[in-house]
Each structure stands twice: as structure tokens, then as C-alpha cells.
Image: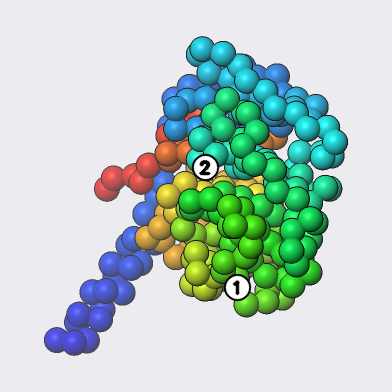
Amino acid sequence: MKTQFTLLLLILSLYVSAQTVIANQIAEFPLEADRFVGVDDYGSQYYIQGNTLLKKNKQNTSQYSALQLGPLSTVDILNPLKITAFYQASNTAVILDNTLSEIKRISFSNIDNFRNVSHAATANDRRLWIYNIDLQQLEIFDYNIQRIVQASRPITTSPEAMTSNFNFCWLLTSSSMSLYNNYGSLLETTPVTELQMLKQYNGHLLSWDGKDFMYKTPNQSDFQKLEIPKIPVKQFSLNNEILYIYDGRKVTSFQLKQAKD
């Protein structure tokens, strides 16, 4: 009986990991931008022109620029009320509200026990996920009290990309993807190769290897190739299981869902 139960669990796990995700095109809109950031839960579009971040919705267009901080490295719109703009050249993160007005500016060079940071993204409450280059560790920084509240053990390989939600953070290196919780604990490591970019929404992971999209749901152990029409990919984002692809002229959106038997 025990052997039969174990066999059943194995079959179920194989079935779950083999389920196919299909992509149905649902819309497209024109966009002139140097970089496409994404679309938030309210349908607002975020993109970068020059070194200016813009937010466009049906009512108006807002913008934010801080030329003195250098090139805008990344923008995290996980929380549209507290957007994280990161400027790696000046080692600075800026928190913006829903009108792109500045709430808080954090210079990691001017805090106690300064640190050099390569990645920064939104965490829960008034906190950021940051990767500390000097100590080679993932840290959670509370910008209200200006200190590190959690940290991982040293990580031997520096991340090429980082994506996160309020409670979890994924680090992508040249050979693996690692998942951490908000206590700095390593939960799992998945071997990967040739992945260049990584996005997530509620634990659904989407990556790009320069040729194909790879998709992983929370109940799958491995990435699977996503069957999608061949279109140029300049940038992409994932929100609410909708994939947005920017080809340099327009953004095309696809609804992702598991295929039914």
C-alpha cells in the first residue's frame, strides 16, 4: 500500500510539472520608448525615455527624472504606491509615489556601514531587497530606520538579475536560480543555463534566454518553454499572469494559462 501511494505521488508530480502553459494574445498598443518597464495592476504603463521615467494612464502622464544620480538602472512597480527606482552608478534608490513624486531617497554610500549595491527592489513595508556586492549577500534594508534587518549567508556567484515580491526574492546567476524568503533563508536552488532576464508575479516566473521564453508556475519544479508567436523582444514584463512584450514599436500582451486536458 505504501509503495502504491508513493507511486501515485510520483505520477501526480510528473503530471503537474508536465502541464503545458499556453499564451493567448489579447491586446497591443503603440509605444515610443528607450525602455519598457511594465504595466501595473491599474493598467498604467511605465517606460523610460532618455533618463526619465514616465507613467501613462487614461487620465494623464507623470514623469520623474534625477539626472544627478546617473543612468536609471531598474524600476520596480510591484507596489504602484511605492515605486523603487534604482541608480547603480550613484549607489542610490529612490522611492516614488503613484504620481512619480519623490517620497524617499536612499544613498547606500551615506548610511552607517555603507555598502555597494548592484540590485535593489521593493520588499514588504518600508523595506528593500538589496544585493550587497562587498559582502556578497542578499539583504533586507529598512529605509525608515536606515539599517539592515535581515541578510542571507554569503553567495558565491554574483546575480545577473533579481526579481521579487513582498516576501520572496529570486536571484538569477549564470548557472542557477535561487529563492530566498524575507528572513534571508535560502529555500531552493534550481539549475538553469543561458537565462538572461527574469520576471515574476505571485511566484509565477518568466525568463528569456535570448531566443525563447521559459515559464515556471509555483507548483512546477522546472522551467518549460512557452509556445508563443515569434516577435522581436526588446523588453518584457509579467503582471497578473499577463505577459507584455515590447518590440521597439508596440507592446503586445498575452494571457498565460495552463492548458486543460
Q: Can residue 18 be seen in this view?
A: no
On the image, the x and y values in percent for residue 55 come to 60, 24
- The residue closer to the viewer here, 113 or 90, is 113
On the image, the x and y values in percent for residue 231 come to 63, 31
Which quarter shows the N terminus?
A: bottom left
Judge the density around disc 2: few (<14), some (14-19), many (≥20) Cα neighbours within 10 Å.
many
Position above or below: 157 against 251 = below
Position above or below: 35 against 10 = above
> Which SS class for mark 1?
loop
- The residue closer to the viewer here, 177 or 107, is 107
Position above or below: 229 against 198 = above
At a point 50% along the width and 13% down the height, the residue shown is 58
Check disc 1 and give the amino acid type: Ser
At a point 70% along the width and 19% down the height, the residue shown is 32
Q: Is residue 247 left or right of residue 256?
A: right
Name the residue carrying label 2. Answer: 78
Q: Quadrant of residue 221?
A: bottom left
- The residue closer to the viewer here, 228 or 215, is 215
Give the color scheme: rainbow, by chain, secondary structure or one colour: rainbow
On the image, the x and y values in percent for residue 6 come to 25, 81
Name the residue carrying label 1. Answer: 152
Query: Which of marks 2 and 1 precedes in the sequence?
Result: 2
On the image, the x and y values in percent for residue 109 come to 80, 56
Q: Which mark is residue 207?
A: none
> Which SS class for mark 2?
loop
Mark 1 → mark 2, Cα distance in angstroms: 22 Å
Position above or below: 7 against 259 = below
At a point 37% along the width and 60% down the height, the residue shown is 219
